[in-house]
Image (tube, rainbow, N blue to C red):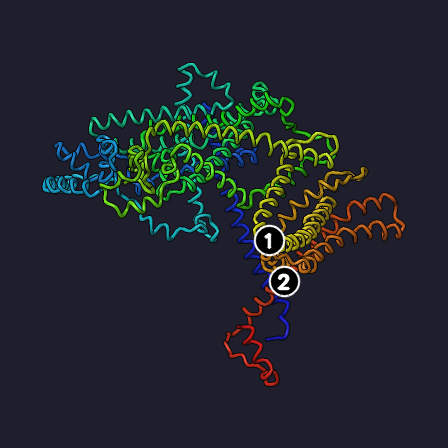
Amino acid sequence: MPSRLPIQDIFAGLVTSIGTAIRYWFHYTLVAFAWLGVVPLTACRIYKCLFTGSVSSLLTLPLDILSTENLLADCLQGCFVVTCTLCAFISLVWLREQIVHGGAPQWLEQNQQQPLNGVGQQNEAQAVVNGGVENAVLDQPANPAPENVVVGENPEIQEEQVDEEEEDNEDEEDAVVEDAADANNGAQDDMNWNALEWDRAAEELTWERMLGLDGSLVFLEHVFWVVSLNTLFILVFAFCPYHIGHFSIVGLGFEEYVQASHFEGLITTIVGYVLLAVTLIVCHGLAALVKFQRSRRLLGVCYIVVKVSLLVVVEIGVFPLICGWWLDICSLEMFDATLKDRELSFQSAPGTTMFLHWLVGMVYVFYFASFILLLREVLRPGVLWFLRNLNDPDFNPVQEMIHLPIYRHLRRFILSVIVFGSIVLLMLWLPIRIIKYLLPNFLPYNVMLYSDAPVSELSLELLLLQVVLPALLEQGHTRQWLKGLVRAWTVTAGYLLDLHSYLLGDQEENENNANQQPNNQHARNNNAIPVVGEGLHAAHQAILQQGGPVGFQPYRRPLKFPLRIFLLIVFMCITLLIASLICLTLPVFVFSVFAGRWLMSFWTGTAKIHELYTAACGLYVCWLTIRAVTVLVAWMPQGRRVIFQKVKEWSLMIMKTLIVAILLAGVVPLLLGLLFELVIVAPLRVPLDQTPLFYPWQDWALGVLHAKIIAAITLMGPQWWLKTVIEQVYANGIRNIDLHFIIRKLAAPVISVLLLSLCVPYIIASGVVPLLGVTAEMQNLVQRRIYPFLLMVVVLMGILSFQVRQFKRLYEHIKNDKYLVGQRLVNYERKSGKQGTSTTPPQSSQE
């Protein structure tokens, strides 16, 4: 092997590498063109062709697909269409898995068995075989137990009765099961057919092979199938329902009302799906009458798909939208707005208005569900039986959508609307009316969408999002306070109304009663009647979980129990009203608004600021004050010396935190935002004949955002000194903050680099260039363009260093391919001079 590679070898290796790179470039370009160009463009053009409503568009479809007009817009719209079709396909596959694993609805299974069994006894036996516990549970509410009887406490009697009935009917069931199994073989074969070996196909097909990233051209077949699937789904799930709804709306004369809603396509499609669901259930009944088994099952499954889709739209789309609009309507007086203003905003931007109301409704539903979860941690299991437990591992909303009838979902939807709407009335509209009557000058709040203050809205919003909200949300103190208040209210209400056992349970009495005989249970309390099970609750949980109620604790029912429950609901409504008044007025919100206005006045002067910022600033101060008071109260029993020691430690920690915050949250974001302004924003926005203006608050706010993005990217990237230092600072936390380490390892290097990046170009442009005797125009050009020029120099240096490393790797690769004979593993031996001195340190380092 020569000491240096010959030029012809290097040239041949370069040509080979360039040829390989060009081949891969062509292949990946073809892949990108197929998946990002052909597929979405074809989907968009086919979608437009189908919804044009003319025959000529179908005839000119091939030419429209090859047209070069509006390529970018059609590709973006086609990507949305393809995403929708893929989501629909994945949802169908997932729904099929839910039906397979969870079982089909009872009405579908029962109807399947009726034509196969001609005798009534066989039908009953088949229902027992297929339904099992479900039918038994569904039949329980038909024969309610007498009052004051323990339901579910002694299941042995019920089990004995069931065993006797099973022994009586055992012979008949065995014969019927055999006949039913023979009759069902054909139906089961039809249901479980599998045209392809899906497991083997899934093992052979990978993402690289499917997308064409493995270098083969098999992906062209997948492109064809995706285009065909898009066309099929557009035709079946969009075209047909839309035209069914369109013809129905036109026939009923509701076309003008639908057009006035600004969402004609969506409403028409939903109407088409509703009519399609009704048609499917009617056809399913007719197929059951004429005993067309395959048609009947196919129509039933199609009805389940349409039913689940409509229920998902109602649960996720319609219900939050109703909540959002109701919140807006009930809070109009708080912001000095009218329904006419909301109508004008909807007319000007219907999509944005509906999305914002849906988003507000979703936030309201989310926090309501979170509060219900907090209530479940405090209350006795079984009190909230009428509300679904989201933490229940057996809770599956899709299975409920599949199995429960549509009237149950409609009843639940109406009940949810009434409950959520009543809470909004109780906690928003009524308190606002009371505040308007008692404090006429307090409302409305200033919620202008612009600011005449020198402080930008953007900086205030970023301050709110980056500083205030994380401090309020990223800890559990607020939740623990709220949980303590709920527990105190529950204990108070329980003892006032003699509902302590119902609300919180009697753990000690339950343990004692477990060791007593059932006939001694009436001696617990003279005024209490033992009740277990709550028949409606038991039936509800049994239907959903195919068994008895889970996590239910017995309680003692006092006298006049319904009256006490009514008083409890009234007491709860009064408490919610008072809590809402407190939150909107004294002492929290009044103090927060006035304190926030007072604090913001030092910042903005007499200019008006969005009330959200003043409220956020005041709430932050309130939270800090309450937190300090609670900490001092917790330290009081420990003595004065311990309090002084704690105050000294916390004061020192606060001083260190303030210094670190000034450096890392003040200086670094300001320098980073100013550098970004000089490098990117000013050259793009300000011409050379104008002078750029810099706003420190805006630069600092943008610098905070950039610093968080850079820190996140650094933590996700490879290991280097900055990532190691940031991880160490995070690991130490605020209590163990190391000021010397942060300044020496993090703040000083970062600030030095940013200052050098700002000062060196300025010194060159303002100090060195004028000494060269250039014109004023050239000096201005250098001053304005030196920062982006230095950025380009840094980027080019990075690219050159990367190419040098790549060339070294290519050089080693060519050398190894041409001259490498083999590789051999040899033992590593230390030198004799260092053997004695270097033996111990490696052992200690390994330990």
User: Looking at numbered disc 1 in the image, what kind of residue is underneath it?
Assistant: Gly
Q: CA distance from mark 1 to mark 2?
A: 66 Å
Dot 1: few (<14), some (14–19), or many (≥20) neighbours within 10 Å? few
Dot 2: few (<14), some (14–19), or many (≥20) neighbours within 10 Å? few
Residue 778: name its quadrant.
top right
Q: Which residue is mark 2?
A: 805
Position of residue 459 relative to residue 56, above or below, is below
Figure label count = 2
Position of residue 690 relative to residue 282, above or below, is below
Q: Is residue 558 left or right of residue 35?
A: left
- Which residue reaches farthest top? 253
Q: Is residue 733 left or right of residue 310?
A: right
Query: Residue visible at 57% across and 22% down?
Result: 342
Q: Earlier in the sequence, mark 1 or mark 2?
A: 1
Query: Which percent across, then down, holds residue 723?
Result: 61, 57
Quarter in which the N terminus is drawn: bottom right
Q: Secondary structure at mark 2?
A: helix
10 or 409: which is nearer to us?
Answer: 409
312 or 571: which is nearer to us?
Answer: 571
Q: Are marks 1 and 2 in contact (CB under 8 Å)?
A: no
Query: Residue visible at 59% across and 68% down?
Result: 812
Query: Which percent across, then down, holds residue 57?
Result: 47, 26
Residue 695 seen in the current view = yes
User: Looking at numbered disc 2 in the image, what kind of residue is underneath it?
Assistant: Arg
Residue 800 seen in the current view = no
- Comparing marks 1 and 2, which lies closer to the viewer? 1
The label shown at residue 763 is none
Q: Which residue is mark 1?
A: 639
Query: Residue visible at 51% across and 40% down?
Result: 482
Query: Which percent across, then down, holds residue 425?
Result: 49, 25
Position of residue 266 relative to residue 217, above or below, is above
